[in-house]
Amino acid sequence: MCAGFPTATADAGGSQIWTYQRTVQRGNLNVVIPTLAVGAVPTVGGSLNVDPGGYCNTQIRMVGGRVAEVAYAGDNNTQNHRDALCVSTVDGCVAYARQRHQVRTGAISR
């Protein structure tokens, strides 16, 4: 329930695989360096394009109504973090599960 409806599902021999697709479009930085040529000095110039967006497919294998495995696929890394575009789906579900556990057991985490 925490991740919402999957984008796709597939039966896989006694289990189901739920796929959640996410596309992140953020700003784009494009820097162009002008070409310079002075006499016998070689030409200097070029461009730099940095696009921090990407996409993520989070696949969750369900066995007996429970999560048995989670895997990520896609262009989902950022400069500083591996699988950064995917983890929000799982992080939200972990927080949801902890909250449900606390309500069910009356436990308070510190």
Image (tube, rainbow, N blue to C red):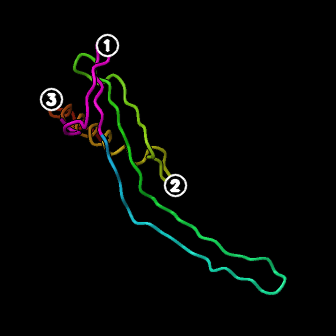
Q: Looking at the image, which residue sits at the far right?
A: 40
Mark 1 or mark 2: name the one nearer the start of the chain: 1
Residue 89 horizontal side relative to residue 103, left or right? right
Q: Check contact, mark 3 vs mark 2: CB within 8 A.
A: no
- Spot occupied by residue 63 in the image (x, y as percentages of width and height): 28, 18
Label 3's element? Answer: helix
Which mark is drawn over residue 110? Answer: none
Q: Is residue 26 above or below residue 35?
A: above
For image coordinates 27% across by 20% down, the residue present is 11
Q: Which residues are magenta?
A: 1-20
Q: Quadrant of residue 12?
A: top left
Q: Is residue 32 above or below residue 67?
A: below
Residue type marked 2: Gln
Mark 3 or mark 2: name the one nearer the start of the chain: 2
Neighbourhood count class around disc 2 (C-alpha, 10 Å): few under 14, some 14–19, many 20 upward = few
Disc 2 marks which residue? 79
Label 2's element? Answer: loop
- Spot occupied by residue 104 in the image (x, y as percentages of width and height): 15, 29
Q: Is residue 2 on the magenta stretch?
A: yes
Mark 1 or mark 3: name the one nearer the start of the chain: 1
Q: In the image, which is nearer the foreground, mark 3 or mark 2?
A: 2
Q: In the image, which is nearer the foreground, mark 1 or mark 2?
A: 1
Which mark is drawn over residue 104? Answer: 3
Q: Check contact, mark 1 vs mark 3: CB within 8 A.
A: no
Residue type marked 1: Gly
C-alpha separation, residue under disc 1 versus residue under disc 2: 37 Å
For image coordinates 23% across by 39% down, the residue present is 3
Q: Quadrant of residue 103?
A: top left
Residue type marked 3: Arg
Disc 1 marks which residue? 13
Q: Is residue 97 on the magenta stretch?
A: no
